Amino acid sequence: MKKLITALVIAALLLTLSSTSVYAGSGGVTGQGKGGNTRPTVDGVWLVETSSDTAVTAMSPLAEYRVKATLGDINTIDDIQTVEFHIYHTSDGSNWDADETAIFKWTKAGGWTMENGSATTTWAMGTNTAPSVFTGTAGDWYLGFRPGKLAQADATANWHASVEVWDEHPSQTGTGSGGNASMGAYNEISVDVGTIVFGIAAGIEPSQTGYIEAPASHYLTTQVASNATYALGSKSDATWSDGGINTITLTGTTDEPPLTSGYFSLIIDDQQTGASDGIPKTSQAVTSTNVTITGLGTQGRTETIDDGNEGTSDKQFYMALSFAVDGINEVTYSGIITFTVTN
Amino acid sequence: MSRLDNSRGGLISVLLLLFLVLAIFSPIPVVHAQEVGIAMAGTFSQQEFELPQGTEVSSPSVYVVVFNHLSEELNVQMLFTAPFGVEVLFDHAIFTLPAGGEQKVYITVKVTEDAVPGEYEIVVAAEATPKEGEGLKIATASAQKASLVVTGESALIYARVVSPDGDPIKAQVRLFKVIEDKLNELALNETGILEAKIAPGIYKVIAYIAGRTLAEETVEVKAGDSKEITLVVRTVYFEQFGIEPNYNPDTELLAFVRIVYSINNLYQAVSNAEVILVVNRDDNLLEQVSLILLSRLDMGRTGGSYSYLPAEGWQAGNYGLKLELYIEGEFYNDSSEEELLVTLPAAPLGLSVVWWIVAGVASIVIVIVIILAVRRRREEIAKKRRVERARRRREEQARKRREEIAKIIILLGKHREELIKKGREEIAKRRRVERARRRREEQARKHREEIAKIIILLGKRREELVKKGRKERIRRRREKRARRRR
């Protein structure tokens, strides 16, 4: 029994000794240890200007900004293999979506890429910077980017950046997020109008009203892309002129024909009365100041879907031109009709 | 084209033919148009201006950008719509955009004293001007609108940025109007001082250095107020702080924790910066360890690492590790706290009763040995501490002795100087006495000489008198004898 106890004590002592062999030294302990490849860390994420580290609080589509990410790894940042940057609205997504989530990536082997896949986009990379020295335990990565034109502008929610970093072990990641910036509104408008003919090709009789006869669709199309709610309006020059003494004046009313000599009326609507007749359904006068076209006061932004292309919101307009009974000379008048998109 | 000829009959067919020909060349209602397009981005539509009469807002953050996405150049004119008394100024009002070009236009909103208080909407638009030519032209315009509240009341706000010591700091200061949790920038200054006339409301002032938000304050300003705001910024901070547990390769037990940190100094070099590791176990302070003491902490990033093992060894519990930064002995900043859960090794499962007994006995023995080891370690630590204290005492005593010796040397020096001074005075005094004595002796000698001369003279006189007396006596005797003879 004594031998057994002695053996047990010796065994226990051996066990104890082996488990308490720690390594003391001045200024911190030294000795061998198994560190277990600590995860890389994301120590800070900011949205900053291109020329400085000044924080951005308001962004604008198609202008360049940067995401600054301070990353760390106790085993030195040379361990870091991949860094993924997301610039997102409200909540971070895992797929590219031009109006909600843009994804960029840095890999040690391949450098910087924009992860939009096959989707056409106006998001773009700017000037990027990765650390030049990887021997330290912390470093700064700068992603230069230009928000796409449809990156949504939302008065109630902002854009942020998130960063995920991987080291040599794919399961070892660090994450972090930061930045808080609003997105400014963006709108663009174009009108595809080859040749428009009011009335018949021969013209419009005084006291009569002509409609869009060519193109055969009887309308013209505005193509709008906007990242925020918008309104579409129109206006016309107050007078049209032949470049000489002959002028005609816009009534700013829906009179057909205008009651005053030498006046003309311009009427617009986004619907027609019947199938393919080109006659504006609801008469709305075009005036010399921009007036929102009825029914187009609050249009939703142009949305995109996951991995989808950026598109436009198209609107058709039907117009009518009406001359007064008299005071209209037989000349060619010039004038400008302006379509305005307003955020 | 307008047909004014109302004639009817046989001429109709001729006229129709004529009209068709005319329509090909220049009929009024035919529009020869082209694809035109313009785009606008920017921050103007986000603005909710709230300005007192007689003020303006002109911030780098209030702008629009006009784009030409076409393949030919575009003439652009900036226009605005605003209420009476309100002016909208563009730094670029008319410009030409090349194909694919863009122009950033900064906007100033100026509310004159003539503006009537109220709520308004202001619109800025970039209008593409069609090229000259005949016929009806289609133009496009991009616009943004913002809200404007003109107030008749105003207040003043004065913000400055200082260090914890109260010294002015050159920082970027930005003033925002808070409207329904949304920040509307009103003013910006890079000098660390910002002053503005504002409408009553809630404002946020933020101080930045190198793009990092270092201090901010939200205040409510009422009409007539003159609000002063002092933003205290800490320009040195822990940018990184991480811990890495290291395990004994044989026992898989926690051996030590490697601590890695970096300090970022944004503003200027500071003296006497010390990093102290503060360790808690189960929310109770365990110990504080000085990791680094720098006589000078330069601007930029300074990193360090440290391998930590508690003085009493690892115990089961939840450890919290945090770094504190002291500058000139005063607390300045701290890091976030890293947590480390330390557990004791679990008992092995699925063993026989004998092994349980063996394990139990072994555990008891291990516990005893651990206790002994811990006690020994504590004793060693205590001994080390005693030795350390003794060494410190000795050093302290040596230092005091050195100080005392230095004091004595100083005193001796002073005393020596005093003695030298006294000696010099004594010598001078003695010399003076000697000179006086010599003068007295000289005078005495002269007196004696004079006396001797006088004595000699007196002696000569006496001799002369004696001679004279003798001669007299001789003469008298001769006379007496003569008389006798006579």
Image: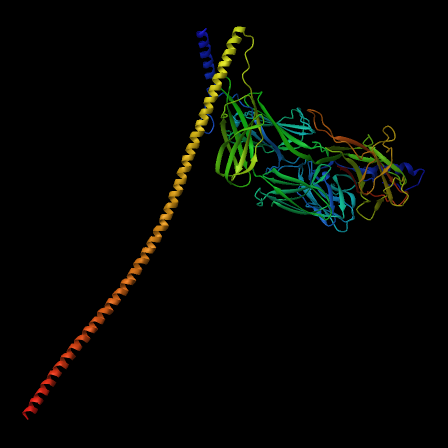
Rendered location of residue B266, percent (x, y): 55, 39
Location of residue A87 with respect to B421 vertically, above or below: above
| B201 on left or right of B435 | right
Q: In what quadrant of the picture does the N terminus of chain B appear?
A: top right
Residue B316 shows up from this direction: yes
Residue positioned 9% across, 89% down in the render: B479
The quadrant in which residue A266 appears is: top right
Residue closest to the far right: B9
User: Between B213 and B256, which is closer to the camera in this rendering?
Assistant: B256
Rendered location of residue B179, percent (x, y): 73, 39
User: Between A179 and B288, which is closer to the camera in this rendering?
Assistant: B288
Q: In what quadrant of the picture does the C terminus of chain B appear?
A: bottom left
Specify the color scheme: rainbow
Location of residue B50 with respect to A188 vertically, above or below: below
Residue B249 shows up from this direction: no
Rendered location of residue B454, percent (x, y): 19, 76
Residue closest to the far left: B485
Residue positioned 73% across, 50% down in the render: B54
| B404 on left or right of A199 | left
Q: How many marks?
A: 0
The quadrant in which residue A193 appears is: top right
Rendered location of residue A254, percent (x, y): 88, 39
User: Between A161 and B458, which is closer to the camera in this rendering?
Assistant: B458
| B346 on left or right of B28 | left
The quadrant in which residue A258 appears is: top right
| A121 on left or right of B461 | right
Residue closest to the far front: B484
